[in-house]
Amino acid sequence: MSIVGLPEAAVREAKDRVRAAIHSTQLEFPQRRITVNLAPADLPKHGGRFDLPIALGILAASGQLPLDSLRETEFIGELGLTGELRPVDATLPAAMAAAAAGRGLVVPAPCAAEAALATGARVFAARTLGEVCALLRGEKQLPAATPVPSTVRSEPDMRDVRGQLQARRALEIAAAGEHHLLLCGPPGCGKTLLASRLPGLLPPMTETQALEAAAIASATGREVAPGHWRQRPFRAPHHTASAVALAGGGSEPRPGEISLAHHGVLFLDELPEWSRQALEVLRQPLESGTVTVSRAARQCEFPARFQLVAAMNPCPCGWAGDPSGRCRCSPDVINRYRTRVSGPLLDRIDLHVDVRRLPAAQLRPDAPEGEPSAPIRARVEAARERQLERTGLPNARLDPAASRNCCRLASADQALLERAIESMQLSARAMHRILRVARTIADLEGSEAIGTAHLTEALGYRGFQPQALAA
Ligand SMILES: [Zn+2]
C-alpha cells in the first residue's frame, strides 16, 4: 500500500493504523497492491484526519461497502489500532465546508458538539470504524450531534476598575466605534485590568462572527470552549512572541495570535519591548482585517479583524510624569524609548490616553466601585446602532471618502482642526482618524452633528492641548 499526494509522516503512518483498524473490525484488508491518492497533489497533508476516509475508500473499493453510500457524506477522523475513532483538529471548518456543499459529515464523537456549531450542518458522531460501516450499510443510525451550548456572558466587569475616569471614558469610546487604543502609564496602574474589560463592553457577536472566531480556534487545534464560544476573544501574547506567533505561519501555515483575536481584542502590553519585526506585521491587518502568510511558493490568507489595545510605560523606569518625582530618566532616554514604537503604528491608533497611578484613598477596599459594564455596554450598543444605520460599518472602519461624508464640521471647528493638525504635525491619515473619533463621541451622545466639544475631546486623545494654539 502506498500513499501519494504530499503526505507528511503522520499521514504515511495511516497505512498501519488503517490496516489494523480494518482487521480489528472483522473486515478484510485486500491482499493486493493499493495506491491511495490524496488530491490535490500539491497541498501538503498532515495529521491523522485522513485515516477514516482512507479506510472507507479501501472497503468500498473492495466491495465491502456500497459505493453509493459514500456519495452524500464526508468523513474525518483518526483511527486507533482497535478501530476506535480519535479526535482531530479543525472539525468545525470541515463541517462548515460540508454544509456549504450540502453534504453530511461524520466525525469522531468527541468532536461532534464543536462541528455541530456550523450553520445548517448535518453532523453525525461515531465512536468506531464499525459504527460508520453499519451506518453506510443502512444497518444502524448514528446520533445527530447537538451543538456546544452558549451560556450567558461572564467577562471581567468594569465594576472592578476604581477611579480612572479618563481611561474609562476612552475605553467606552473605543468600544463604541471599534477604535484602537493606547494606554500609557506607570507599572501597576491598571492598564491590563482596563484592557481585559473591553470585550465585555462590545456588542454581542453575530452568529457568523462567532462561527468565524470559533473556526479559527478549531483550526489551530484549540478546543472550542463550551459555553464561551460566543464571547469575544481576548488575546494577550507576551512581548517576546515572534512575528510568526503573532501573524501566523510555520511549515503548515497556521493562524497566529492576531487571527485568534479575530472579532475580539488583541492586547499588546509593553509595546516598546516588542521587536520591530513583530509590530511590523500588524500594519496590513490593521488596515485590511486580514493577514497574508507566505511560505515558499504558497500563500495563505487568514482573517484578522481585531481591535488593538496597546499599553506602554511612559519611560524605561515607568515613572515619568508621576507626581512622586521618582523618574530619573533623561529626556533623551525617554525620547529614544518612545520612538522604539514606529510612527506609522502609532498613527493607526486612534485613542492615546494617559493612565495615572491611583491615589491611595481609591485603593482602599471600601472605596466606591466603578460603573458596571452592563449600562456602559447599553450606551455602546446604542451608539453602534447609529453607526450601522448610517454606513453599515463601525466608525473606525470608515474610508476617507465616507468619513468626509459623515464627519462634517462647522467652519469654525474645521479651522480649529486644521490648526491643531498643523501644530501637532499630524498626517492626513491621523486627521481622518480624529474625525472618526469625534463622530463616535457625537454618536455616544445621540447627536447627528459633530460639535466643538466632540472635536476637542477627540483631539485630546492625540495629545492635543488647546493652550498650544494660544501660545
Ligand atoms: Zn523614568
Image (cartoon, grey):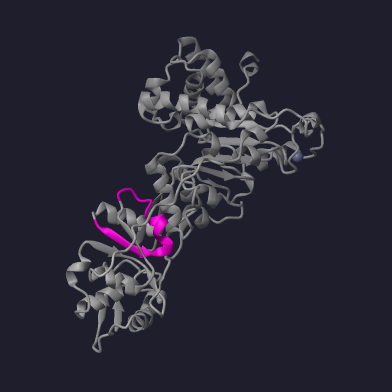
Q: Please, is residue 277 above or below residue 442 in the view?
A: below
Task: Name the residue: 53% across, 40% down.
Answer: 153
In the image, 199 versus 150, the foreground residue is: 150
Q: Please, is residue 125 above or below residue 346 in the view?
A: below
Q: Residue furthest bottom?
A: 31
Question: Does the magenta-highlighted stretch encompass residue 115?
Answer: yes
Is residue 38 visible in the rendered image? The answer is no
Question: In the rendered view, does 333 fall on the left or right side of 195?
Answer: right
Quarter for ligand 1?
top right
In the image, 172 versus 208, the foreground residue is: 208
Q: Position of residue 428 (x, y in %)?
A: 46, 28
Task: Answer with the quarter of the image where residue 24 lies.
Answer: bottom left
Is residue 26 visible in the rendered image? The answer is yes
Q: Please, is residue 174 above or below residue 138 in the view?
A: above
Q: Position of residue 44 (x, y in %)?
A: 35, 68
Q: Position of residue 230 (x, y in %)?
A: 46, 44
Quadrant into which the N terminus falls: bottom left
Task: Name the residue: 34% across, 84% down.
Answer: 23
Q: Point out the stretch of residues depicted in magenta.
A: 103-120
Q: Please, is residue 104 above or below residue 356 in the view?
A: below
The number of discs equals 0
Quadrant into which the C terminus falls: top right
Question: In the rendered view, does 5 fall on the left or right side of 451?
Answer: left
In the image, 229 versus 168, the foreground residue is: 229
Question: Does the magenta-highlighted stretch encompass residue 434?
Answer: no
